[in-house]
Amino acid sequence: MNKIAPFFLVLSILITSCSSNQAETLSESQENLLQSYTLKRDANGAYSIEFNTTNNTDVVTVQNTDKSNQIILSEVNHKTANKHNNKFPIENDQLKIGFLDVNKGKRTRISVEDDNITLAKRGVTEFLNSYSITKNEDDTFLLSFKVNDDVTTEFTYNEDIETYEIHLSNGDAKQKDFSRTLNLKNSNLLKLDFVNHKYFGKSIETTETRRPRQVIEEIS
C-alpha cells in the first residue's frame, strides 16, 4: 500500500492541475458580455443609452438609493436579445449609469453633469443641440455632436485637468455636425466637457460654463 499511495497522490495532483488550467483557459477566452454602447442626448434634452451584448446575456436594470442606475449583465445558457435601449432622466442635474459584467467582474461607470433642459422654455441649450458618445469594440470612443445655428466650435485637450474640451461660442460658422475619435486616458478614464462661452454687454468679457460634462471610467 505504501508504494501505491504516491502514485495516486501524483495522479490527483495532475488531474487537479489540468482542471485548473482548463478553467483558467476558459475564463481567459470568455468574451465580454457588453460589446458596445452609445450614450445619447437628443435635441429635447432627453438622455438614453443604447448597448449591444452577446446573444446569451441576461440584462437587469436597477436604481440604487443614490439615484444611480446599474445595468447588470450575466451569462445564461439560452439565446437572448443583443440590442437594448434604456431611457434615463437627469435628476438634480446628474445622471449616473453603471454596467457590471458579472462573469468578469468588469465595471463601467458613466457620470453626466447637465442641466435638465426638458424643464426649460425651449428644448435646446444656446449652443449645443445634441450629442452622442459611442464605445467601440476596439476600446476607442466616437463623439458625435450637433450645434445650433451661428455657433463657433473649437476642439482641444486640456492637459492640466486631463479633459477633452469642446469650446462653443457665438459666431458665423456654417458647419453644424462634428465627430471625433477619443481614447481613454490613464488606461481607464475618459473626461469630456462642453465649454460654453457667453459674451455679455458691450464688453469682450465672457462667462464660461461647463455643461454637459461626462466622465467614463472602466474598471477591470
Image (cartoon, rainbow, N blue to C red):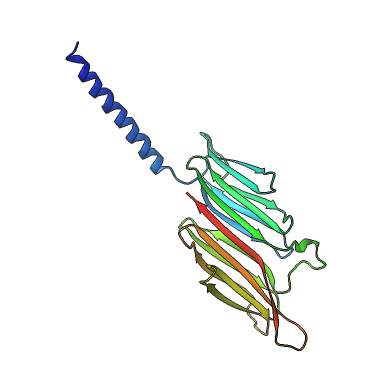
Number of numbered discs present?
0
Front position in the image: 39 or 217? 217
Front position in the image: 137 or 10? 10
Q: As drawn, is 193 to the left or to the right of 182?
A: right
Q: Which residue extends farthest left?
A: 3
Residue at image point 29% right, 26% down: 15
Residue at image point 83% right, 67% down: 121
Asked if residue 133 is positioned above or below residue 167 in the image, the reply reads above
Q: As drawn, is 71 to the left or to the right of 118?
A: left
Residue at image point 35% right, 39% down: 25
Q: Which residue extends farthest right?
A: 121
Asked if residue 168 is positioned above or below residue 52 in the image, the reply reads below
Q: Which residue extends farthest bottom?
A: 202
Residue at image point 69% right, 47% down: 66
Q: Position of residue 69 (x, y in %)?
A: 65, 48
Q: Quadrant of the N terminus?
A: top left
Asked if residue 209 is positioned above or below residue 57 in the image, the reply reads below
Q: Position of residue 193 (x, y in %)?
A: 61, 68
Q: As drawn, is 163 to the left or to the right of 130?
A: left
Quarter occupied by residue 206:
bottom right
Q: Which residue extends farthest front?
A: 160
Q: Position of residue 97 (x, y in %)?
A: 62, 51
